Amino acid sequence: MKKVLLVSGCSFTDSNYISSYYPDMDCSWPKWPEVLAEKLDMECINLARNGGGNEYIYSSLFDEITNGFTDRIGLVIAGWSQCQRVDYQLESHGRWHGSRYNDNGDIFGWVRKSLRLFKQLEILCENYNLPLLQFQMINLFMDTLDGLKYSDAEIVRNPDLAGKRHPYDGDYDEDRRKIIKLIDDCNVKNFVGWPIYTRPESAHLWVDDKDVGFTVEQKILRHPKTPKKYEPFIKRLYLERLIDENDRHPNKLGHEKIAEFLYDTIKSKKN
């Protein structure tokens, strides 16, 4: 019997992803967990859900790991999301719901909570002697500091929201330095791309320095170079790996590239 690749994440990982821009589009291509499982000769259990936040990602993995079949799990992978997202369960069957916006707390508390979840998953897997790989699929906190964009679904309902953001009312530079200190003080193992922020501060979107962290979305779906000043953002994307310039989720090729990167990362750790 094959071992299980157990995965959770957000819309960049969801096997049942439906495009808000193109709801009739057939997005049934294999997502990166399925592609990676085939490369590893494993059975895939993909728990990711569209809009999932970090509490959902941790909780879904926790519930599956503790349900009594840990002897079948060969590898656990968490593709973490944005820190500000809210996840909650309703009704006796525990159906998950969520929101991209959080009316309670602040960015420091949201980052701290996510860092705890990273560490809790590490401890959980160590307790059950399970191999673990963690990474930020999308940026943990910069989307909030930059001013959180409206969701695809909101823009589809109201096109005037395209390009607009929820303004951040704190001190951008000072708050970013404080968040970096929180991350630097957190010791997390088996985390690809750690410390999950980039330098210099004026180029936080780019993987252009070996002494920085990265998200998988940055690493695989954006050009790995510093852009020219004022260059349109759309020119900084690997459009051939995305659905299109509106829906910037990975297409079939994008998922294959993510799986390829993670496969090479796993193999390099074993060697």
Image (tube, rainbow, N blue to C red):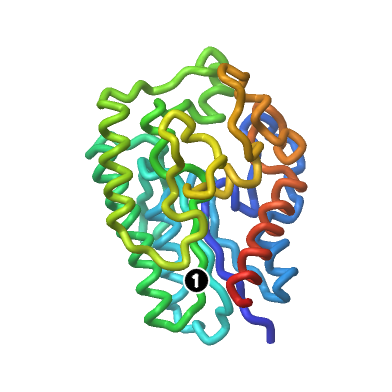
Residue 136, given in percent of the width and then of the height, sits at 49, 51
Q: Residue at x 56, y 30 (%)?
A: 152
| 76 to 221, vertically: above or below | below
- Name the kind of residue labelled 1 in the image: Leu
Based on the displayed image, in which of its 4 quarters is residue 261 positioned?
bottom right
- Mark 1: few/some/many CA within 10 Å (<14, 14-19, 20+): some
| 46 to 176, vertically: above or below | below
Q: Residue 93 vs residue 252: left or right? A: left
Based on the displayed image, in which of its 4 quarters is residue 121 positioned?
bottom left
* Depth order, front residue of 55/147: 147
Residue 177, given in percent of the width and then of the height, sits at 29, 38
Q: Residue at x 73, y 33 (%)?
A: 239
Q: Residue 237 vs residue 166: left or right? A: right
Residue 126, given in percent of the width and then of the height, sits at 40, 79
Q: Residue at x 60, y 52 (%)?
A: 14
Q: Residue 227 vs residue 175: left or right? A: right
The number of callouts visible is 1
Q: Residue at x 58, y 79 (%)?
A: 74
* Depth order, front residue of 35/86: 35
Element on which disc 1 rests: strand
Residue 71, given in percent of the width and then of the height, sits at 53, 87
* Depth order, front residue of 30/108: 108
Q: Quadrant of the C terminus?
A: bottom right
- Residue on which the image places disc 1: 132
Q: Quadrant of the N terminus?
A: bottom right
Looking at this view, name the residue that lies furthest to the top: 160
| 50 to 231, vertically: above or below | below
| 29 to 128, vertically: above or below | above
